[in-house]
Image (cartoon, grey):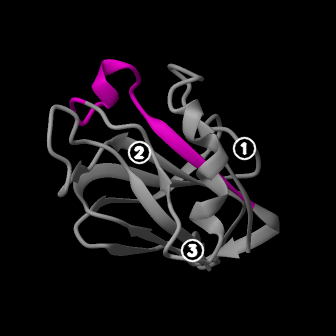
Amino acid sequence: MAQSVTRLVPDAPDLDAVNDGALPQAIDDNPVTSWNSLLYANDTFGGFASNLALVVGLQEQSTVNQVQLEQLNGSGGSFEILLNDQPTLEGAQQVAQGSFTAPSITLPIPEANGEPRTAQYVIINFTELPQLANSNGPFPWGIKLAEINIS
């Protein structure tokens, strides 16, 4: 269902741009590959930005029932799932929120007025970074995302 993925950081558009080449690995149906963010000194992106969003473009306007995130070695953090008809946070509707409490997190997307929700873009908006279990040193916060599955 996912066709593309881009990074969106409104406060600092170039933040984490060095890792953009690996973004497709988050939607390649291969849990061995992953997209990794930079590592930061705290859970708020080292003070460089207030959020980092991954915008997943679907092949067409589609029903979205759930979003599953497969991640590596992180715990905590905070993110929200938003739906939109454009690849932007502007006008996006928050439909779920979560934290990394396990390697695989599945968030059901609630219906609206008894109808399944539809969107062209599913946005995972990270507002706090998880702490990585195997990261020693002064920069233990970051994202290691193996797969984004949307159904």
For badge 2, the amino acid type reads: Phe
Sequence-first tag of 2 and 3: 2
Q: Residues within 10 Å of mark 2 (few under 14, many from 20)?
A: many
Magenta region: 41-57
Instruction: Return the disc, 1 or 3, that comes first in the chain's sequence.
Output: 1
Judging depth in this view, the residue of 33 and 101 nearest the camera is 33
Q: What residue is pinned by disc 3?
A: 149
Q: Which quadrant would the N terminus be assigned to in this image?
A: bottom right
Specify the amino acid type for callout 3. Answer: Asn
Q: Which residue is mark 1?
A: 87
Q: Which mark is residue 15?
A: none
Tell us which disc is closer to us: 1 or 3.
3
Say which label, 1 or 2, has the lower sequence index.
1
For disc 2, the marked residue is 126
Q: Look at the picture and state if 36 lies above or below 119.
A: above
Q: Nearer the viewer, residue 14 or 126?
A: 14
Q: Position of residue 46 (x, y in %)?
A: 29, 24
x, y percentage for residue 34?
A: 50, 62
Foreground pick, 5 / 89? 5
Residue 12 falls inside the magenta stretch: no
- Residue 44 in the magenta stretch? The answer is yes
Q: Residue at x 24, y 36 (%)?
A: 43
CA separation, marks 2 and 3?
16 Å
